[in-house]
Amino acid sequence: MRVSFDELKSEIKRVFVKNGMSDEKADFCAQIHTESTYDGIYSHGVNRVSRFVDYIQKGWVDINAEPVVEKDLGAVKVINGNMGPGILNAFYAADQAMEMADKFGIGMVGLRNTTHWMRGGTYGKYAAEKGYVAIMWTNTEACMPPWGAKECRLGNNPFVMACPGEEGGPVMLMDMAISQYAYGKLQVTRLAGKQLPFPGGFDKDGNVTSDPGAIEESMRIMPIGYWKGSAFSFMLDILGSVLSDGIGAADLNAATKGSCGGCSQILIVVDPSKITDGAKMRDTVKRAIEYIKGAEPDEHNSSIHAPGEGSERFHKEHDEKGIFVDDTVWEEIKAL
Amino acid sequence: MRVSFDELKSEIKRVFVKNGMSDEKADFCAQIHTESTYDGIYSHGVNRVSRFVDYIQKGWVDINAEPVVEKDLGAVKVINGNMGPGILNAFYAADQAMEMADKFGIGMVGLRNTTHWMRGGTYGKYAAEKGYVAIMWTNTEACMPPWGAKECRLGNNPFVMACPGEEGGPVMLMDMAISQYAYGKLQVTRLAGKQLPFPGGFDKDGNVTSDPGAIEESMRIMPIGYWKGSAFSFMLDILGSVLSDGIGAADLNAATKGSCGGCSQILIVVDPSKITDGAKMRDTVKRAIEYIKGAEPDEHNSSIHAPGEGSERFHKEHDEKGIFVDDTVWEEIKAL
């Protein structure tokens, strides 16, 4: 079905308030879930609401918790998220990082003991729209085998990079999971009776495969770049733990507080306005985008995108027809 | 042939001194080239010496240049490398970043107008061995098509992450180029008459291929994770330029001062000793490594590695038999 932005937000807010959140916090979180949905990231928008409520009810998210600064090194703060809502903790951390960047040029927050921040790009976009450069990531429970293994022992540890853009919003790596495909993508592809465009994992016998069902069965999804992504994801996991005084995949799996329950997030923010001239920065970004877009397209008549452009087509569609919400998901929320 | 560490270093040093470098600088650079060779990274060690000398002779590297701090924001410095030797500039920048991390918890250097730093992992390892966490990268001239294009418009922008390890050296992503395979790997595989273990690019007709020769011909190497690596590499390029007040792939290609001539490097260093307890950090890293290594191996009886372990087998071989140097490369250096 199709709903308006306000209708969707108010329904999500109602559910959050009903589950004990203050009006102010519920309004803020509902706004973020609705924005992600508007951007076409349904998985971390409206489709995630019922799971979040489930986590509240199980005590895996403490909606009354407040983040606390435990250490302050000047340009680094360690913040304990106290298992509060991931969205609120991450915004608090991003604000703290920007405040430090105002003073010292760069600021880093290591946020530990927090919960799922939904779409990682939310916080990179937030910082970049205020004129900052951002590098951020979260560690996650294990959902991917390390290279050479059968068993899931690595998180997909989504990674975010954002830079203020010339116009039309930041240039950014919105939320790059280190797995080649999300489980959501495998499911959608399988239900459509299709194969993945490129191999996405191994079947239960260890053969590389593009068959989404075979990968869902084996749970052997592949990291981007094979051994490279495996190493990259591992580094994101341990730097996540070390730089936040928090925990990584091994302990997250043992904690069994749901997806990302107790995870660590790193938010690094730099103020480029003190490094380079604003007009020069916009020109650098503009020319870099023009440079890649000016390349001769390949034989598949692909269009060449700058990172972060993906949401434009969803905005257009959602503005014209209303925001898409899966009927089942909408009924589920209505019933919460 | 096989040479000792000292023999190799002294021969490289001789060449550098003969080409106008001071004894002190030549000694330092020769040490780094020799260490990379000892670690098995021939491409950025001994095999790169003659190209470096060629760049000196062409005026693309100014061996007498000194790096200059142009901006100091507290925890961020912008340094102009003045086209000096990349190794010396990057060590200077790493030292500056660590000094800032001592004061503020984190330090970032944006190093612009510098030259090839050889193996990126050198600087991450340097910082991690002193107890720091490091995130670093360089941008490069275009050598890879953006996703959906035929023409090379993206750098491979090697990315480094390092963390102090429990024992036996840091845990690190040594030098992760964002291309799936280096051209060196394509050449070696082609000469051995083999196929790549996984597709590495497109042939001239746009077909995905594992044939190294076909990719060398088309110059259409693939980014890790297809569209994901394309976006990641692009972000490394523009953040490289923006955070150093420097230039990226578009201008590097126009500058035609050789590989990485005029490039930008970002060195972010954090002092984890102020964030977490040293024993706890070592335990976190140790358990994370044990966790991935404890996974059931796959059907190919692969061994599961922690990032940064790759050099051990080279050390063993080089200690036993001497350091391997390709005969042609050795003759070339001798003649320089």
Image: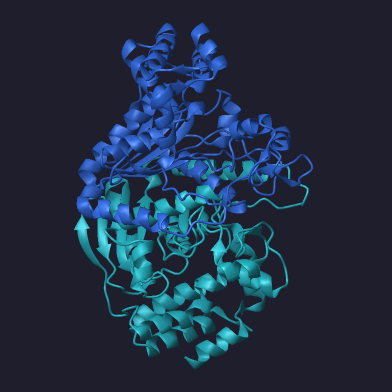
Chain colours: A cyan, B blue
Provide residue A118's location: percent of width, then percent of height: 45, 69
Q: Does B231 sit above or below residue A48? A: above
In this view of the protein, which residue sits in the foreground, B116 or B82? B116
* Residue A264 in view of the camera: yes
> What residue lies at 32% left-to-right and 28% top-to-bottom?
B92
> What residue lies at 37% left-to-right and 24% top-to-bottom?
B88
Provide residue A2's location: percent of width, then percent of height: 63, 82
Q: Does B92 sit above or below residue A111? A: above
Q: Is residue B147 left or right of residue B30?
A: right
In the image as oriented, which residue stretches furthest toward the bottom? A335
Number of marks in the image?
0
Provide residue A34's location: percent of width, then percent of height: 50, 75
Q: Is residue A63 left or right of residue B213?
A: left
Q: Is residue A137 left or right of residue A227?
A: left
In this view of the protein, which residue sits in the foreground, B70 or A86? A86
Q: Does A313 sit above or below residue B322? A: below
Residue B233 placement: quadrant: top right
* Residue B336 in view of the camera: no
Provide residue A316's location: percent of width, then percent of height: 65, 68
> What residue lies at 25% left-to-right and 46% top-to-bottom?
B271
In this view of the protein, which residue sits in the foreground, B165 or B324? B324
Residue A24 placement: quadrant: bottom left
> What residue lies at 29% left-to-right and 58% top-to-bottom?
A244
